[in-house]
Each structure stands twice: as structure tokens, then as C-alpha cells.
Amino acid sequence: MADENILKITKRNHLKSMITKGFVYAAAIVTFGVLVYLIGYVFAKGIAYVRPSLFAWNYNSENVSLMPALINTLIMTGTALLISTPFGIGAAIYLVEYAKRGSRTVKVIRMTTETLSGIPSIVYGLFGMLFFVIYLKMGYSMLAGACTLAIMILPLIMRTTEEALKSVPDNYREASFGLGAGKVRTIFSVVLPASVAGILSGIILAVGRIVGETAALIYTAGTVARVAGSLFDSGRTLSLHMFLLSSEGFHTGEAYATSLVLLVVVIAINTISSLIARRIGKNNG
């Protein structure tokens, strides 16, 4: 009798395990299928409109070139990361290495970070317009858009960096202290190099959000279709360029082509960043 009960329990557990395994495989297949369908749909719709004229230097009513928007996207991405990355990494270092764990200050900072992560991008855009564009008198400019995006991605970089720092074993810190290194030297010579792969992962996610943002930039960076001569000039990014073309309704095919180029840019950035993170991780390992 006891053996029969054990056998029944074993079969039941095996059945549950198979069902769970099947559900996991199905979820993975659906996710991969959605990605493939999305890429295939954008490729099929946009490949016919990817012409050399689409990459001309100047934009005009006859040739809606995406080159100015592509260059502005790179400028916007670099500027936003340059502003937000030091603050995000610095805040994460404070929370992990200096702040007392479980203190009220840590709880307040984390609650603030989670709140910032959940704010819709359109609200960031309105804030950026009121504060950067009007109050600080930046006008519709790349700098106003970059500052707004920097605030948007700050929680993402901060949380991913915090988790990366937590993943570093305490033995690394203790060994560094045992060799006579101070707190600052231990952080910059031991902890940060060991967690750089995780930090880069957060930056990659931040790049994806910057490249795909439109709502916040309409109110801050403007929609001028030319390469920004400086950070104080207005300019549209690729995602904003695609949105404007599709909303106007006159260049729908070019909008699909722009989305295809945007998709290729995002995949290329993610691939290159992942390779860099992997190589750094192997060198540190």
C-alpha cells in the first residue's frame, strides 16, 4: 500500500512537472514567435522603400530622408547617457556600499526610484517642457530632450547597477580590505570591474528606451528635420521621425522603412554592447 501511494505521488509530481515544462516551452515559443513576426512584418513593409535617397543628408518635402534623424538619435543617446550614467551609478554605489541596509533613507530612495520608473513618458515630456524648455529657457533643443530622457532612464540604470553591485561576493571586498586598500579604492578597483557586465546590461536597456522614445521629445526636443548644429538646436530622432511620417499619412512607406532602420540600429547596439559586456566579463573572470 505504501509503495502504491509513493508511486501515485511520483506520477502526480511527474505530470505536474511535465505540464509546467510544457507551459514554459510554450511561453518561450510564443515570445520568440512574436519577435520573429514583428521583425518580419516590419521588414516586409519597409524593405521596398529603403533606397539610397532615404539616406540623403538633407530632408525636404520630396525626399523624406532619415539621415538627419539618425544622427540626432546618436547625439541624443550619447548626451542622455552622459548625463544619467554617473548619477545612476553613483546612487547605486551609495545604496550598496555606504548606506546602512534597511535604513529609512534607503527605503525612501528606492520608493522614489520605483515611482519614477512608473511615470508615463508623456508626463516626463510635460515636465521637461515646463522646466527645461520654459523655466531654464533652453527652448526646444536637443539638450532639453536629453535632460528629460536622462531623468527617465536614471531609475533603470540605478536599479540594474545596484543589482550588479549586490552580485559581487563580499569576499572580494574583504580580500581588498585585507590587503590594505581603502573603501574608495576597493569600489573602483575591485567591485565596479567585477560588476561591469551587469552595469552595461542596464545601459543597453536604457539605450533601447532612449531610441524608442517619442512622447517626451515632442515637448522638449522639437520636430525640426535637420541635423542639430549644437545641443541648443531643435531636432527630431528616428522614432519621432517615424511617428510624424505615419501621422501625416503621405509617406507611410518611408515610415515603415524608418522603422526597419530603427530596428536594425537597436539590434546592432544591443549586439555590440552584449559582446563588449561578455568580453569584459571574461577578462574580469
Image: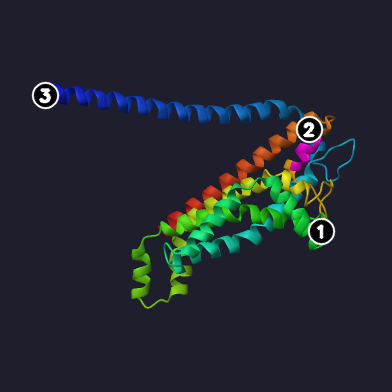
Spatial CA span between label 2 and label 3: 68 Å
- Circle nearer the viewer, 1 or 3: 1
Say which of 75 and 166 sits in front. Answer: 166
- The magenta stretch is 240-246
Residue 7 lies within the magenta run = no
- The residue positioned 82% from the left and 42% from the top of the image is 56
Q: Give the numbered dot on residue 3.
A: 3
The outermost residue toward the front is: 104
The outermost residue toward the left is: 1
Quarter of the image where one finds residue 173: bottom left
User: In this orientation, does residue 94 appear?
Assistant: yes
Q: Position of residue 200 (x, y in %)?
A: 53, 54
Quarter of the image where one finds residue 26: top left
Quick one: label 2 or label 1, which is nearer the N terminus? 1
Q: Position of residue 122 (x, y in %)?
A: 71, 45
User: Are the two marked residues, 1 and 3, in contact with CB atoms closer than 8 angstroms?
Assistant: no
**Count of all numbered marks drawn on residues in the image:** 3
Which amino acid is tagged 1? Ile
Secondary structure at numbered mark 1: helix
Quick one: label 1 or label 3, which is nearer the N terminus? 3
Secondary structure at numbered mark 2: helix
Q: Is residue 29 left or right of residue 272?
A: left
- Circle nearer the viewer, 2 or 3: 3
Tell me the quadrant of the picture where the C terminus can be found.
Answer: bottom left
Residue occupied by mark 1: 134
Residue occupied by mark 2: 246
